Image (cartoon, rainbow, N blue to C red):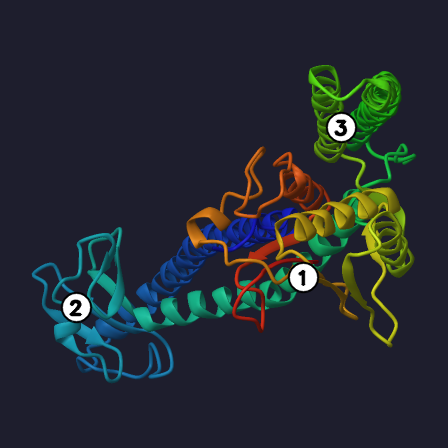
Amino acid sequence: MSGPRSLRRRLTRGLALVLVGFWLLAVLVAGMVARHEISEVLDGHLEDAAALLLPLAIEQAARGSAATSSDAGTAEGPAYVLLDAHGQVRLASPGADPGLFAAAPDQGFASTSSHRLFALRDPKGAGVLVVAEPLQEYRDASLETGRALLGPLLLLVPASLLGVLWILSRALAPVDHLRRTLETRGGTDLSPLGLTGLPRELAVIAQAADDLLARLRRTLEAERAFTADAAHELRTPVAAALAQAQRLSAEAPPGLVRTRAEQVEAQLRRLARLSGKLLELARAEGGGMLAEVPADPTPVLRAVVEEFRRAEPGVRIVLRLPQAKVRPSSLDPDALAILVRNLVENALRHGKPGGEVLVTLEPGGTLSVANDGPVVPPERLAGLTRRFARGTGAGEGSGLGLAIVGAIAQGADLRLELRSPALGRSNGFEARLSA
């Protein structure tokens, strides 16, 4: 299915069709008028010829000449005959065919399939002169006139089309400028367009776009501020309650009180993890995932991997980075760190105990995180990016890790592929992100 047609192409095609149509209509009307005028002129010539030949033919016939004579006309002039009152030929021009004049009128014009006839009666009753002119003369004159009208048209139409294209190019230049301004903008550039000198119709659109960008900017700023404030306000009381639970667990004597304190501590840890994941998910779905300037993702990957290694010295995380220059990432560094952290955390939690997690960055920017855990069935694999969806791993999770990854990928226009078994393995799970 083809995309939407260009406005320039629509206007050019429409104006060209209208212009050519009007030119052809004008030529057609002019040709019809010219044909009518040519017929009148030729009829006038035929009438004048009859008026000149009539007295000569009557005089020639009165002298008792033969029925055909060359004194009153020549073979180069119009053919004619002089008829008496009974319709008998008294005189004929050289080469005149008497049958041609069988349909001659008593007075005025008439036409046959091949000739135009004009009959002029002598006022004194001496006879009727009928003059004949081939219709081909009329046709040739009309054809020459049509050629004369069409000739300039072959030059005027292309010149007019070039003029239309030039006018459209100048008229649509502000539209192209507005289109290029919008196309070259990144997803994070919410500053005003700042376009001036636009036509009134486009100025309204540009102003509406600036108003929309301002509202989006305020919304994103409010969302980021809320996320930061909520994270701080939630972490502080949860951390304080967790510290109190840990102290109570440490100070309580063995027995029911310590057991309950340990249960409270575990639930508070779970609440801290869940609130953090919910805040990450809210940020991912709220937008603001793109960086203003694309940057090298390798420092973020190294920092996240080292963070896991310090927190859990026994984990086996292998980071493979390309030797060549890496394609810059369009993700905001914080969003990239959240994405990688969730992928690695998911791979560790659901992988084989003591197994290896492989983090690979390809030169083209594709990122993959794979483990050697059990194979996830295809029907379950398709739903892992839904909220609170859990895999088959042994660890307890919130079910939000891959949902956060999916939201970030969607907001950054990245392709997320989930594979099980992992590529090149007989088991495991792999998540791949590519542009």
Residue of label 1: 355
Separation of marks 2 and 3 at Cα, in angstroms: 121 Å
Q: Is residue 73 above or below residue 36?
A: below
Any part of residue 174 in sight: no
Dot 2 surroundings within 10 Å: few (below 14), some, or many (20 or more)?
Answer: many
Q: Amino acid at mark 3?
A: Arg
Q: Earlier in the sequence, mark 1 or mark 3?
A: 3
As rendered, which of 29 and 188 lies closer to the eye? 188
285 relative to 411, above or below: above
Q: Which residue lies under the disc numbered 2?
A: 101
Outermost front residue: 254
Furthest residue toward left = 86
In screen coordinates, is 322 left or right of 368?
right
| Mark 1: secondary structure | loop
Separation of marks 1 and 2 at Cα, in angstroms: 116 Å
Label 1 vs label 3: CA separation?
25 Å
Q: Identify the amino acid type marked 2.
A: Phe
Which of the two residues, 324 or 61, is positioned nearer the viewer here?
Answer: 324
In the image, which is nearer the foreground, mark 2 or mark 3?
3
